[in-house]
Image: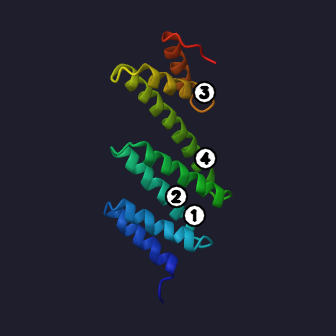
Amino acid sequence: MRPSAPQAMNVLGNYLAARGRMKEAIEAYQNLVDNHPDSPLAPMAQLQIATLYRQAAADGDRNHVNVARAQEAYEDYLQRYPNTAKAGAVRADLAAMKRELIAQQLEVAEYYLTKMKDTNAAIFCYQEVASKGDVNPAAAVKAKARLKQLGVTVR
């Protein structure tokens, strides 16, 4: 019996991911999702995309792009497969990622203020974080406190 195209794409994605070839693995999984969205393998392939981006962000390549791409992949999963067994866990992961992004933005604000001595850029970042209290309340409190120290009126 010959494997189906979705099975072949899934095996290829698994093979590439196991060898650390993230970009190519993501492409294989994305091909499966795009070309065979009704395949029973498509939801897991979509999760693999998010997982690989998240792993890249955690493995030292913590750039904002990988985190944002992981977030987008999770959101795509929820849009395409909202009623799957893993949807609840994906929602929780997505909420955690959003909190992480806000925390990173707070770190950027601190960097601008303390290392770059760019108060205007720091204030901009702190204001962004302060406005996201519904996503990361702890970071918003810290940002508001910094803004107050800087003499900026917090809205």
Q: Which residue is mark 1?
A: 43
Q: Position of residue 138 (x, y in %)?
A: 54, 24
Q: CA distance from mark 3 to mark 2?
A: 30 Å
Ranked by sequence position, the earlier of labels 3 and 1 is 1
User: Are discs 2 and 1 less than 8 Å apart at CB?
Assistant: yes
Q: Which residue is mark 2?
A: 47
Q: Secondary structure at mark 3?
A: loop
Ranked by sequence position, the earlier of labels 4 and 3 is 4
Q: Which residue is mark 3?
A: 131
The answer, for residue 106, to whether it is visible in the render is yes
Mark 3: give few (<14), some (14-19) or many (20+) Cα within 10 Å: some
Dot 4 amino acid type:
Arg
Q: Residue sitting at 54 percent across and 45 percent down?
A: 93
Q: Which residue is mark 4?
A: 91
Ranked by sequence position, the earlier of labels 2 and 4 is 2
User: Are discs 1 and 4 less than 8 Å apart at CB?
Assistant: no
